[in-house]
Amino acid sequence: MARKAVISYLRAPQDPNVSSISVQNGDRLILSDEGEGVLFDGIVLSEESSESSATASNTAYDYAWYLRNKICGVFKGSPAEVAGQICTYLGIPCGDLYDPGGEAEIVSTGEKTAYQGIAEAYEGSDAHIYMEGMALCVEQYGQILAGTLTGDDRITDAAYKSSLENMVNRVIILDAADQPVGEVGNGLSEFGAVQDFYKAAGDAKNPQDEAAKLLKGFENSGKVSAVGGTAFVTGRAVIVEKAGTKIRGRFVIISDEHSFANAEHTITLGLRFGEVA
């Protein structure tokens, strides 16, 4: 879940007209805009060069890369408390931690990463886990509005897709003896039947609710390309206007790509259609 930055530049140490740039693995890389703040803060993890073209490039990941550390122990409390305990365990600072309430208990004997443990604690809470510099933060998806993009000035392209490729419109519930004891559907029977099975675990979970989670219908997705802005990042919301009849309203950003080339900043945002407002 770490953000990635790739930089490419001219490297010609024998040419006095080319500024010398030296970026090495382990260096800290910060990408910032004086007017909008820091877009990326991370550590360089690879370097490449080509003598034939006199170019070099570096790839860096933000500090969420360290959430791949494995954890061992029992972490218990509210989701925010569990996240704080895991960070303390690894020596990672914490920033703002969204807390939906409730109790979570994460048990790991070394098989789970820190990210997996935190994500499990927040399961069902639509939480976006990210790094602010070296500090871990958690916010609820779409609660912060990044801004508005409109086809009148900033949007250069918009694409929309609706698919039934992954449809599951019937789930049969099985008991401990693998006998059918119930069924849930989503009303898409006119497209034929694609079924799945859910085996009741005998715990406190409601089999009907758990089986319903396996149902899949129309999957709508879209993206917009626009003149850039560092505020438009994954986890935030964006209002899209005049970009086409299929992409209009307030969306949650689920992916973001920023490109800086030829003195231009452009962005491509992946949009979530689950709760378009």
Image (cartoon, rainbow, N blue to C red):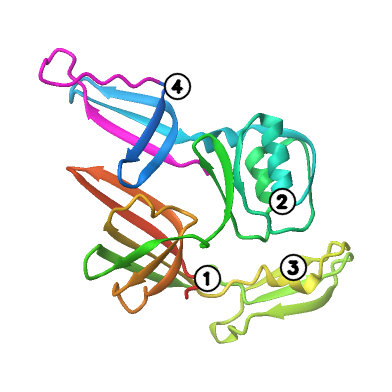
Of callouts 3 and 2, the N-terminal one: 2
What secondary structure do most residues of the magenta stretch adopt?
A: loop
| Residue 10 place in picture, x, y as percent | 20, 26
Of callouts 2 and 1, the N-terminal one: 2
For the image shown, how many numbered marks are present on the structure?
Answer: 4
Q: Which residue is mark 4?
A: 26
Q: Amino acid at mark 3?
A: Glu
Q: Which residue is mark 2?
A: 79
Q: Nearer the viewer, mark 4 or mark 3?
A: 4
Q: Nearer the viewer, mark 2 or mark 4?
A: 2
| Residue 51 place in picture, x, y as percent | 21, 19
Location of residue 116 with respect to 170 vertically, above or below: above
Badge 1 element = loop
Q: Name the foreground residue: 4 vs 130.
A: 130
Q: Is residue 16 magenta?
A: yes
Q: Amino acid at mark 4?
A: Gly
Horizontal side of 215 relative to 72 (left or right) equals left
Compute the Cα span from label 2 to label 4: 32 Å
Q: Name the foreground residue: 187 vs 254.
A: 254
Of callouts 4 and 1, the N-terminal one: 4
Q: Nearer the viewer, mark 3 or mark 1?
A: 1
Picture disc at residue 127: none
Highlighted magenta segment, given as a residue range: 1-24
Q: Amino acid at mark 1?
A: Gly
Q: Which residue is mark 1?
A: 274
Compute the Cα span from label 2 to label 1: 23 Å
Compute the Cα span from label 3 to label 1: 19 Å
Classify 10 Å Cα crowding around label 2: few (below 14), some (14-19), many (20 and above): many
Q: Which residue is mark 3?
A: 210
